[in-house]
Every structure is written in C-alpha cells, then in structure tokens.
C-alpha cells in the first residue's frame, strides 16, 4: 500500500513565525502537489513539483521536492493568519497501475494573531 | 470562468438507501475525478472519468459507481449506504493538457451524513 505521511499533523504558531511541514513516502512519484483546504471548501492547488531537487516559491511559501522524488517540504516565512488551513500533499505515479494518485492526511495549521 | 460546482451541498440519508451526487466541471475540462474525504482516512481517490469513460479507479467497493455525460458533467452513486459512508465527497476537474492530475480544480464538496 502506498502511503504519504505528513508531519506534523497539527501545528499552531504565532503570526510572524516561520514553519516547515513535511510530506514523506517510500515511493517515487512522477509529480507531487500541495493543496490548501479551508473549512467548507475543496482543496486549492498551490504548486506542482516534478523534478527531483526542484524548489518553487509562491510569495512567502517555498516548496521543495526531494532529490529522489520521495518527499517534499513546504516552508512558510513570516506566517499570517490567512495561512490557516489544512495543507495536503498528493503524489502521482506514472500511469501503469491502479491508485495513481494518493493524498496525505494533511497538516492542520493554525496561525494565532 | 465558473468553478467546479457540486450539488447538493449537504445530504442526510439513512442506512440502506442510495444517493446520487452531481458535479459540473469547469467549462472545457473533460477529466472529472471523485474523492472521499474523512477525518480518519483523509482524501481517498474513488474514480476518474474522461470523455464519458472511466479511466482510473480507486479501491472502493462496487457500491460506489459513477458516470460522465457528453457535456462532461458527472454523477456518482452510492447504493446500500452504510454509516461509514458519511464523508465529504469532492469532485475535481482537470484541463485537457498535461495529463489528468497535473492540475486539479476542486468543487466545494457534498457533505453526506448517513444515519
């Protein structure tokens, strides 16, 4: 069974602090995506990474794909209350087997004012 | 451009009943995927439809089925509902280029409660 483990499960920090959340697996992915989901809404895609070692920046958010394409991290600089939400990672395999995409269970982030 | 819409937003059913959920993708998107989200299991892939054909399927029992129409709208059906089917059901559509899941746009979901 393919698994994507996200850590930490919960994180509560003060506004202005930095944080990093992780997404790890023993499987190699062809691509990995990060989403943010707010209550009552569906997940919203933040970024897709496809190359081992790739780093992408989205304003204060920095995403990194591991060299072996098995793990990823999301770093937020100077967190704001608007960053509060459930952060999900999703890994995709090449298309030759079932369950070609899996999601981690997410990191629930709460930024305190 | 309108986003992905799902109806109904909330639904309450009893065990043994069946339910049909509807999803309208973003205009021009031909791929529609369905997911089940629960606190314990997270987001789990149900199936994906492309041009009215099921292209991929997750590990769910046959009680879960779906279909896609010529206008790309999709429905999923759950028969003989069980308490464990209570969940948020999410639909996502993808643009035609670059494969199915390189970019998914999710709807707000249908919250199903089975009593």
Image (cartoon, coloured by chain):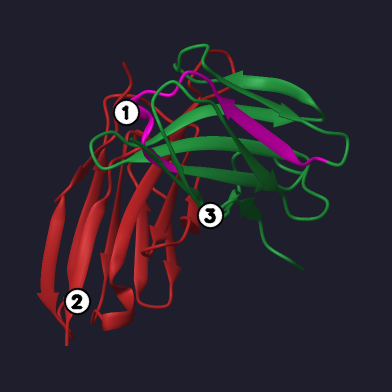
Q: First in sequence: mark 3 or mark 1?
A: 3
**Magenta extent:** B72-88
Q: Position of residue B73 (x, y in %)?
A: 77, 42
Q: Position of residue B89 (x, y in %)?
A: 48, 41
Residue sitting at x 60%, y 45%: B92
In the figure, is residue B78 to the left or right of B75? left
Magenta highlight on residue B17: no
Mark 2 burial class by Cα count in 10 Å: few <14, some 14-19, many 20+:
some
State the residue position of label 1: B83
Q: Is residue A47 visible?
A: yes
Disc number at residue A54? none
Secondary structure beneath disc 3? Answer: loop
Q: What residue is shown at x 80% (from left), y 40% (from top)? A: B72
The residue sitting at 38% across, 30% down in the picture is B85
Question: Cα distance, mark 2 to mark 1?
Answer: 34 Å
Colour applied to chain B: green
Which numbered disc, 3 or 2, marks the residue closer to the eye?
Answer: 3
The chain letter for the residue carrying disc 2 is A
Which residue is the site of mark 3?
B9
Image quarter (top left, top right, bottom left or bottom right) of the N terminus of chain B = bottom right
Q: Chain of mark 3?
A: B
Residue placed most toward the observer, A90 or A94:
A90
Provide the letter of the chain coloured red.
A
């Amino acid at each position: 069974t393919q698994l994507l483990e996200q850590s930490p499960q919960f994180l509560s920090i003060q506004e202005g602090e930095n944080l990093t959340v992780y997404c790890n697996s023993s499987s190699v992915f062809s691509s990995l995506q990060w989403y943010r989901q707010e209550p009552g809404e569906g997940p919203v895609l933040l970024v897709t990474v496809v190359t081992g070692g790739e780093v992408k920046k989205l304003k204060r958010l920095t995403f990194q794909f591991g060299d072996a394409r098995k793990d990823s991290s999301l770093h937020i600089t100077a967190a704001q209350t608007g960053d509060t939400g459930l952060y999900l990672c999703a890994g995709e395999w090449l298309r030759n087997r079932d369950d070609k995409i899996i999601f981690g269970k997410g990191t629930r982030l709460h930024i305190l004012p | 451009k309108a986003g992905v819409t799902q109806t109904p937003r909330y639904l309450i059913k009893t065990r043994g009943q069946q339910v049909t959920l509807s999803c309208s993708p973003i205009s021009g998107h031909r791929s529609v995927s369905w997911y089940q989200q629960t606190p314990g299991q997270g987001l789990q892939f149900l199936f994906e439809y492309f041009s009215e054909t099921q292209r991929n399927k997750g590990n769910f029992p046959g009680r879960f089925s779906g279909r896609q129409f010529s206008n790309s709208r999709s429905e999923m059906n759950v028969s003989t509902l069980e308490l464990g089917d209570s969940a948020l059901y999410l639909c996502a559509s993808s643009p035609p280029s670059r494969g199915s899941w390189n970019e998914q746009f999710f709807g707000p979901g249908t919250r199903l409660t089975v009593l």
